[in-house]
Image (tube, helix red, strand yellow):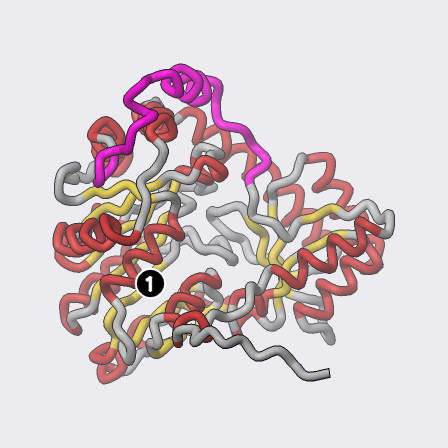
C-alpha cells in the first residue's frame, strides 16, 4: 500500500512544531483508566480549585451587559487594565501606566507567543533555564532560533549561574526567558538573581521576559516582581496569568506589563494576529485583581498544606525532594538506579499514580519527576501511601 503524501506545501514553521511532551503520559493514564485502574493523576497542572464566589458573581452579572456581547477594545477593557495597574501598585509597589505598559492577553501562553513573534527572528539566540516550561523550547524551535540552555542544578537551588555564561554568548542572546516561581521545580528567584539578570540585559542589550504565572503562590515570602527592581522597565516585560492565582485557568485571561516599546509592538502584532479576552471575563478578572487578595492567600495556604503532605511523605519514604518556595508542584529525584522516565512508569504501573518525568522539561530533568499538588488532600495522602508501599 502506497503511503499518502499531502499535496499541501506546509510552512517551515508547521513542519517544525515539536510533539506535545505531555501527550504520552495522557495516553498512558487514559489506557490505565480504561482498564479499570484507579489512577491518581498528579501529572496535570490543571487547578482543582474554583474561582471565589465574588469573582463568579461578577461574571454572572456582567454576562448580561450588552456591551460585553460586542468586540472588546483592542488593548483590553480600560477597567481591566486599570485593575492590573492597581494590582501592581498594591501588591508590588510598582507604577505601571495602563495605557502604554499593559496589554490584556488570553493567558500566559498567548502572551509568550506574541512576545516571541515580535522579539525573536530566525537565527536569534533565546536563553532560559533547564529544566524549563516546554513552551519556551517549542516557541524557540518554531522561531528558527538558537536555544541557549542555562543548567539549573540542585546545589544552586535550581537557579542557573548567570555569571557562568560567557560574555560572547550573552552578546548573541536576544531574549532571556525567566520563570519564577518556576515550573517544574518550584524554585523562587531572590532579588539579587533578578538584579543580576537586569544588569546583564543592559550590558549585553537583550530583553527579559519574566513568565510570572505563579505570582502570589509563595510559601514563606512574597515573590518579587522583576518590574519592582531598578532598570527593569528599560529591558523587561512580565507575563501574568490569572489562571493559578485565582483558579481561573479555563477563563483564559492575563496581561503583559513592562517596557512600553515591547508592549507597543505586542499590541500591533496582536491587533492583526490575536483575539481579545471575553468582556465578562475581563470584568471578573478586574474584580479579582482589585480585591484584598485574601482568595490568593487562601490558595497559597492550601497548596502549602498539600506540599507538606507530598514533600514530607515522599521524604519519609526515602526520596530526595526539592524544598521549593512556591508554585504548585513537587520536584523529586528518582530512586538510585532509575531515570525519571523509568520511575514515572513504575509509579503508574505499580502504584497507579501518574507523575511527569523530568525529561518533559529538558535535559537537566533526566533524573527527576514532577508531582502536581492539584488534587484533594485525601487523594494526595493516598498517592503518598501507594508510592511508599512500592518503595518499601
The answer to which of 387 and 240 lies nearer the viewer is 240
Q: Is residue 196 visible?
A: no
Residue under the point 58% across and 69% down: 359
For residue 284, above or below residue 6: above
The answer to which of 48 and 330 lies nearer the viewer is 48
Residue occupied by mark 1: 177
Residue 382 position by quadrant? top right
Magenta stretch: give its range: 47-76
The answer to which of 83 and 347 lies nearer the viewer is 83
For residue 300, above or below residue 13: above
Residue under the point 59% across and 66% down: 358
Residue under the point 63% across and 64% down: 357
Left or right of 271, for residue 39: right
Left or right of 128, for residue 44: right
Residue 72 position by quadrant? top left
Q: Secondary structure at mark 1?
A: strand
Q: Where's the C terminus, which quadrant?
A: bottom right
Left or right of 391, for residue 147: left
The answer to which of 183 and 1 lies nearer the viewer is 1
* Residue 391 pos. (x, y %): 81, 60
* Residue 3 pos. (x, y %): 65, 81
Amino acid at each position: 500500500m502506497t503511503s499518502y503524501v499531502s499535496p499541501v506545501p506546509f510552512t517551515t514553521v508547521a513542519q517544525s512544531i515539536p510533539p506535545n511532551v505531555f501527550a504520552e503520559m495522557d495516553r498512558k493514564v487514559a489506557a490505565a483508566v480504561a482498564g479499570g485502574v484507579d489512577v491518581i493523576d498528579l501529572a496535570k497542572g490543571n487547578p482543582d480549585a474554583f474561582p471565589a464566589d465574588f469573582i463568579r458573581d461578577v461574571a454572572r452579572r456582567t454576562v448580561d451587559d450588552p456591551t460585553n456581547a460586542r468586540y472588546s477594545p483592542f488593548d483590553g477593557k480600560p477597567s481591566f487594565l486599570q485593575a492590573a495597574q492597581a494590582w501592581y501598585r498594591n501588591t508590588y509597589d510598582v507604577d505601571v501606566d495602563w495605557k502604554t505598559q499593559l496589554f490584556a492577553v488570553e493567558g500566559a501562553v498567548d502572551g509568550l507567543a506574541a512576545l516571541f513573534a515580535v522579539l525573536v527572528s530566525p537565527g536569534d539566540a533565546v536563553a532560559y533555564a533547564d529544566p524549563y516550561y516546554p513552551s519556551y523550547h517549542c516557541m524557540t524551535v518554531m522561531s528558527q532560533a538558537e536555544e541557549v540552555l542555562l543548567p539549573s542544578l540542585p546545589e544552586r537551588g535550581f537557579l542557573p549561574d548567570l555569571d557562568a555564561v560567557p560574555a560572547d554568548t550573552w552578546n548573541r542572546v536576544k531574549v532571556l526567558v525567566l520563570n519564577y516561581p518556576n515550573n517544574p521545580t518550584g524554585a523562587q528567584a531572590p532579588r539579587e538573581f533578578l538584579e543580576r539578570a537586569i544588569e546583564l540585559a543592559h550590558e549585553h542589550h537583550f530583553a527579559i521576559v519574566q513568565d510570572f504565572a505563579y505570582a502570589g503562590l509563595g510559601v514563606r515570602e512574597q515573590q518579587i516582581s522583576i518590574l519592582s527592581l531598578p532598570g527593569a522597565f528599560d529591558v523587561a516585560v512580565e507575563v501574568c496569568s490569572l489562571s493559578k492565582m485565582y483558579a481561573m485557568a479555563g477563563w483564559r485571561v492575563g496581561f503583559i506589563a513592562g517596557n512600553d516599546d515591547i508592549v507597543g509592538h505586542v499590541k500591533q502584532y496582536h491587533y492583526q494576529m490575536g483575539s481579545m479576552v471575553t468582556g465578562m471575563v475581563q470584568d471578573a478578572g478586574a474584580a479579582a485583581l482589585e480585591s484584598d487578595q485574601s482568595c490568593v492567600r487562601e490558595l497559597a495556604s492550601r497548596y502549602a498544606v498539600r506540599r507538606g503532605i507530598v514533600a514530607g511523605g515522599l521524604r519519609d519514604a526515602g526520596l530526595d525532594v526539592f524544598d521549593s518556595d512556591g508554585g504548585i508542584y513537587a520536584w523529586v529525584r528518582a530512586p538510585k538506579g532509575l531515570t525519571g522516565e523509568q520511575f514515572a512508569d513504575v509509579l503508574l504501573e505499580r502504584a497507579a499514580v501518574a507523575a511527569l518525568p523530568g525529561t518533559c522539561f529538558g535535559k537537566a530533568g533526566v533524573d527527576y519527576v514532577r508531582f502536581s499538588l492539584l488534587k484533594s488532600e485525601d487523594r494526595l495522602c493516598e498517592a503518598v501511601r501507594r508510592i511508599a508501599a512500592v518503595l518499601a
